[in-house]
Amino acid sequence: MVKVKTIITTDGEVDDMNSLIHLCLYLNEINLVGVVYTSSQYHFNGDGIHTLGEVTPNYRTSGLAGLERPRTKFGPDPDGKFLKAFRPFPMGWIEELWNGAYAKAYPFLSKNADGFPSPEELVKITKIGNIEFEGDVRFDTEGSNLIKKYLLDNDSQPLYLQSWGGVNTIVRALLSIYEEYRNTEMWIELRNKIVDKVRILGVNKGIGQDNSWLDNKILELYPGIKTLCPENLYGTYMGIVPMQPDIAAMFKANWMKKNIHNEKSALMDEYHLMKDGRKVEGEADVYQFGLHGILDFGFPNVPAQHFEQYDFIGEGDSNTYIPLLSFGLKGNENYRYPGLLGCLLAGDIEAGTPYNLQTGKFEKYNPFIKSYQEDWAARARWCYQEYSEANHAPVVEIKNTNITAKPLEHVAISADVFDPDYDEVKTVWEIYPQYNHYGGKANLLRVWEQTSLNTYFTVPDDAKAGDEFVLILRAQDVNETPMTTYGVLTIKVN
């Protein structure tokens, strides 16, 4: 299967750092062609000459007023226009990660799976983008030129641009192409090619962590360009407070110390946790979670949350890369089907309410995220264990992935499962109503024998032509650190 091609832009906040450290364990699963430093409303490094107001009059930053506790001002800080820098992030931290902790894990990671890029390859694709000010699109940079290169190439494969900070470096690349080609005969064809292949994650309804997308009228310059958001979120700040019950403990100190920050892996020990004693260079005191363990954003209706030492902090930007990981699901191949965070939705569409098989109710519930968290624990051991010591995910093969059938037809479904470590594998077929395309009255749809690899599904009698049922096989090995692979088949009514 062709790996998803992607570029990351990041403003270097602690949750960005965590996202990148976590992603290191999955670099064999994607085609990462660029990592770019960028700015945002929360972090910009300045140029030593100008102020924010001179460069970006329509800024979003809450500035110094947003650092006061209790807060008395909300929204853009009028005095923010005088800022010459704000919460500047440490330059070079990404290269230090590649050459340091990742380099130590790389020999072991490569023994456990093919396809991990070398530290040298990662350093080569790490570039500085538009970091001087929030929303800064004044000039081309190494980072914007890297993005521009992949926008202009002749590869029609989708290119996923991840916005972990401000979207301004991505906007600069798009503007650069527009300025260079808009008065040429090839502009319309070139624009359409870019619109067809680009998908941008981290921008919702034109708003990211700056106003550059809207201010520069990107949708007018590139009509139809796609922005995508996942149905469910992972690891956002405060997101672990109302966590779904089946995974709540997997974000707490005991789990983190046992599986991630356990002093066995230099790479995972780089991961930031609450009150772990580490200070982030350039960050404001109120956001030094490694020192005080308090999430307090100063909003009147959001009380401060106090966390235990080594509790999870956050990695909210992982919502842009997790949907690109397959795990056997089809979410990154066809947006009608779910991935680990549910379906990818157009940036102006609100998600529906998922169905929870555990409670039998429609409620906010992600049925796949526990598998991802368990997989993290297993892959963390890849950083220091030989192949024979570590666990590896089962392999699933669905015999027929696309089936057509008529109402009341008994459809035979079949799969093979193999575990590379010869572990026992437990399997179950699952059907989630929110992923079907069926408006009939049958609510609890099941296969005949849920745990059998070879079984049947009966198409409801009121199914209509064009209806589609999505059957998902979950295969999990029996192991101290279990890993899960999914298989997906669809039954379309004719």
Image: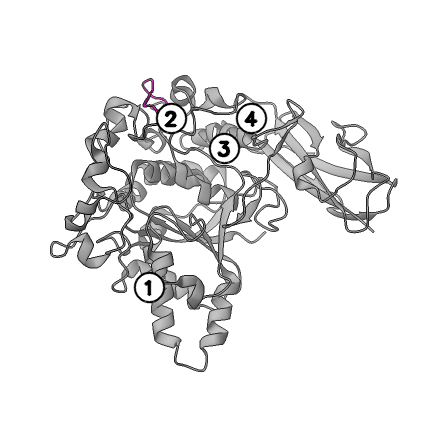
Q: State the residue position of label 1.
A: 145
Closer to us: 116 or 357: 357
Where residue 84 appears, x then y in whole percent?
Answer: 15, 50
Q: Is residue 260 left or right of residue 123?
A: right
- Report helix, strand or loop for mark 2: loop
In the picture of the structure, the residue carrying the numbered disc 4 is: 482
Vertical side of 261 occupied by 5: above or below: below
Indicate yes or no whether the magenta region holds residue 347: no
Q: Toward the viewer: 66 or 242?
A: 66
Mark 4: which secondary structure?
A: loop
Tell me where residue 299 appears, x and y as whole percent: 31, 30
Indicate the secondary structure of the residue bearing disc 3: loop
Residue on which disc 2 sits: 312
Question: Which structural element holds mark 1?
Answer: helix
Residue 387: which numbered mark, if any? 3
Q: Are marks 4 and 3 in contact (CB under 8 Å)?
A: no
Residue 246's spot in the image, x, y percent? Answer: 54, 22
At horizontal 31% and vertical 37% (from top left) the residue drawn is 101
Residue at mark 1 to residue at mark 4: CA–CA distance: 42 Å
Q: Are marks 1 and 3 in contact (CB under 8 Å)?
A: no
Sooner in the amino-acid sequence: mark 1 or mark 4 = 1
What is the CA distance from the residue labelled 2 to the residue labelled 4? 21 Å
